[in-house]
Amino acid sequence: MQPWTRVEQDFYEVVPISCAYPSFAIHENALYCNVSSLLSEVVPPKPKFTAENVPDMTRKVVLITGANAGIGKETARVLLLKNAEVWIGCRDVGKGEATIRDIKDRTGREAHLLKLNPANLRSIKESAESFLSKETQLPVLFNNAGVMNPPVEQVTDDGFDLQFGTNVLGHFYLTKLLLPLLLSTAKTSPDRNVRVVNTSSNGHWFSGLDFDTFKDGPKRRAKSGMALYGQSKAGNIVFSAELHRRYRDQGVVSTSLNPGGIRTEIARHQGGSIQWIFGLLMYDVSHGAITQLFAGTSRDAVGLGGQYLIPWARIGKPRADTQDPQLGKKLWTYMEEQVAKL
């Protein structure tokens, strides 16, 4: 069953509408939703943490994937105003350059551009090597980019489901390649930690992990695009928790989060009435950056490694299977095998 009209995103940052307003659709896996947890994500209280609470980030390097629009772009804007050295990871150089110009016009501060395509593993390696040749520290990594519900026939350049390959495997590989820099930064940081912030979605409630659908094949193509999206968002949480288990003793604070139902370009392919409803129910993009800014910068988030955060900067409760250490180990091992020969 296709739960929603197809919404395509071209290397666009994750916009978590997939479970935010369940009246729009009923998915077969929605039965697994914890209603109280879901409602807590959908109807958040007034934020206690805002962009104004982001501390000074002078001399701190930040890399944000998918920052050419929406939540990622807003995160970059706020961090530049807080004096961070911001890198925008973007597949389309033209869009990235336009984003940098726009943010500079609004803030007087200029970000750096890193050409980055999470749907191509060899390209990720080249991008990581380029970044490592220019920077000697990385206190904060925002794994923010993603795709949502593209045509099912679309796959990555390496033959993986486009959503799993981009949203999960691509960010795993980028993080793996940058891990030596992250660890060395944690050792020399006054706070003895670095942050890795993984943007997920409450769409993770719609699907667990089916390893047989990570690569293209009949079983994957039999699934709906939204089921595959939910799987990728569950994968973000599983990866984040496992990253924290493996490297927390070396100063890595890894969190996953649902940024909330945010008014972005997500509804651009919808009819006028649906866009009108989205406009009424969703929040401004400034709200979308709150939770990941909290996770990436607040001292109060240092002790939240392994947690799943919900709007606005609160601890949430994800699907129970996403917290299973055995599943985390299995996913990590699988992804290690996929990139071992690159």
Image (cartoon, grey):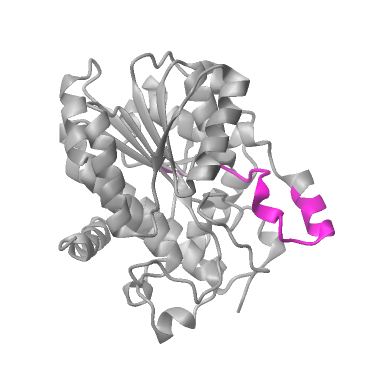
User: Magenta stretch: residue 262 in it?
Assistant: yes
What residue lies at 38% left-to-right and 51% top-to-bottom? 237
Q: Is residue 180 above or below residue 120?
A: above
Q: Is residue 45 left or right of residue 145?
A: right
Q: Name the image quarter holding the C terminus.
A: bottom left
Which quadrant would residue 118 be assigned to in this image? bottom left
Q: Is residue 20 left or right of residue 270?
A: left
Q: Position of residue 248 (x, y in %)?
A: 21, 36
Q: Name the image quarter holding the N terminus.
A: bottom right
Q: Is residue 152 left or right of residue 5?
A: left
Furthest toward the bottom, the residue is 218
Residue in the foreground of this view, choosing between 164 and 205 = 164
The range drawn in magenta is 256-278
Looking at the image, how many numbered discs can be counted on the residues?
A: 0
Q: Is residue 340 above or below residue 186?
A: below
What residue lies at 37% left-to-right and 56% top-to-bottom? 168
Residue in the foreground of this view, choosing between 181 and 318 = 181
Q: Is residue 141 left or right of residue 8?
A: left
| Observer able to see residue 323 | no
| Observer able to see residue 125 | yes
Q: Position of residue 2 (x, y in %)?
A: 62, 75
Q: Position of residue 264 (x, y in %)?
A: 66, 45
User: Magenta stretch: residue 35 in it?
Assistant: no
Which quadrant would residue 324 be assigned to in this image? bottom left
Furthest toward the front, the residue is 94
Q: Position of residue 163 (x, y in %)?
A: 45, 63
What residue lies at 28% left-to-right and 57% top-to-bottom? 122
Residue in the foreground of this view, choosing between 28 and 14 = 14
